[in-house]
Amino acid sequence: MKILIVGGTRFIGKNLVSELVKKDVEFVLTSRRINPDVPNSQQIICDREEFNKSKGRKQKFDLIVDFNGYNAGQFYDFNLRASESKYFFVSTAWIDRPINGTRTYDSRPLTKTFFNSIETNYIKAKKEAEDKVVENYGHNAVILRLPIVLGIDDHHKRLDYTIYRITNSNKYTMPNNGDNILETILVNDVSKIMLKLILNLDTDIPKHLNFKPPQKTTYLNYVRQISSFLQKDIEFVDIEVDAFTKNLGKVAACDPFWRESESYATGENAFQITNSQPTNIRDILPYLLKSNLINAVQHEAFSQERTYFARN
């Protein structure tokens, strides 16, 4: 088996590459940057639109895993080896979300995910990209719809930011009591499920797969799990959505969870068809605590929240 990984140098792609190395699966990476963890692998450094001019253009592959296709105009006909070969396109579960509903002024839980204009355009572009993949590759296409993915080496540092807020403050703002449903998953679960699919390419794989976790949890319970592991008593401060976005705009922008809601989950469930169970968040927290670094924007958001608590 020979696999082309389109983008495999950060987070999910990098994690999958590590799993492929363990199983001694042959792969080629193409990206704008190098993956230093696999120096002996074939790596084609170029923009995806330039791949047809690279040394990889004549190679044929049993599987293509595409992590960085963001719009329909980016697609080049990579060479599949045979009629049963597959094209895995990594998309977003946000496509399955009811979006941009009218905000309420009461304390009922959020029922819709509120996206800004950039995110709304991202979702539309992803949907068009999905359609292009199906158009180009037909029955060979498999769409993988991922929710928010967390874990080690996340360049967005989303879980790091949550841990930082808990460990460095005694209070935590929680819009609408944190009653909204989270469908986050951990990166190691994504890569392990993808590896199972890759090692069983000869089986019937559904055209659309959602990675919705089997168990539901709320934002409040999720943060409570983390604070319990950290043995940190934390006061959750309820705040209405409009007040949150108005008075704590930087926190609202950095917090990846408060806008989440349950999706319609189009397609078959990846956990179920691969007989997989999600990793407990507690199992990866020790590794995250070794660094617990956040970026400058997240530092500003944390300072805004501390100032808000001091004034209220």
Image (cartoon, rainbow, N blue to C red):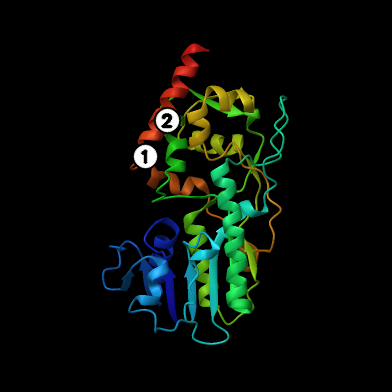
At a point 60% along the width and 61% down the height, the residue shown is 128
Decide which of 71, 142 is in the foreground and name it: 71
Do we see residue 276 in this rendering? no
- 249 with respect to 24 (left or right): right
Decide which of 307, 199 is in the foreground and name it: 307
Where does label 2 land, which residue? 167
Q: Quadrant of the N terminus?
A: bottom left
> Disc 1 to disc 2, how far (Cα)?
10 Å
| Mark found first going from the N terminus, 1 or 2 | 2
Q: Position of residue 52 (x, y in %)?
A: 40, 76
- Circle 1 crowding by C-alpha within 10 Å: few under 14, some 14–19, many from 20: some
At a point 58% along the width and 75% down the height, the residue shown is 136
Residue type pointed to by label 2: Thr
Q: Is residue 170 above or below residue 198?
A: above
- Tag 1–tag 2 contact (CB < 8 Å): yes
> Considering the numbered disc 2 on the image, is that residue within a helix, a strand or a loop?
helix
Q: Is residue 32 above or below residue 279?
A: below
Q: Residue furthest top?
A: 311
Do we see residue 156 in this rendering? yes
Q: Which mark is residue 204?
A: none
Residue type pointed to by label 1: Asn
Q: Position of residue 111 (x, y in %)?
A: 71, 39
Q: Is residue 56 above or below residue 5?
A: below
At a point 57% along the width and 58% down the height, the residue shown is 126
Decide which of 157, 134 is in the foreground and name it: 134
Q: Position of residue 79 (x, y in %)?
A: 47, 81
> Considering the numbered disc 1 on the image, is that residue within a helix, a strand or a loop?
loop
- 51 with respect to 79 (left or right): left
At a point 63% along the width and 77% down the height, the residue shown is 138
Where does label 1 land, which residue? 292
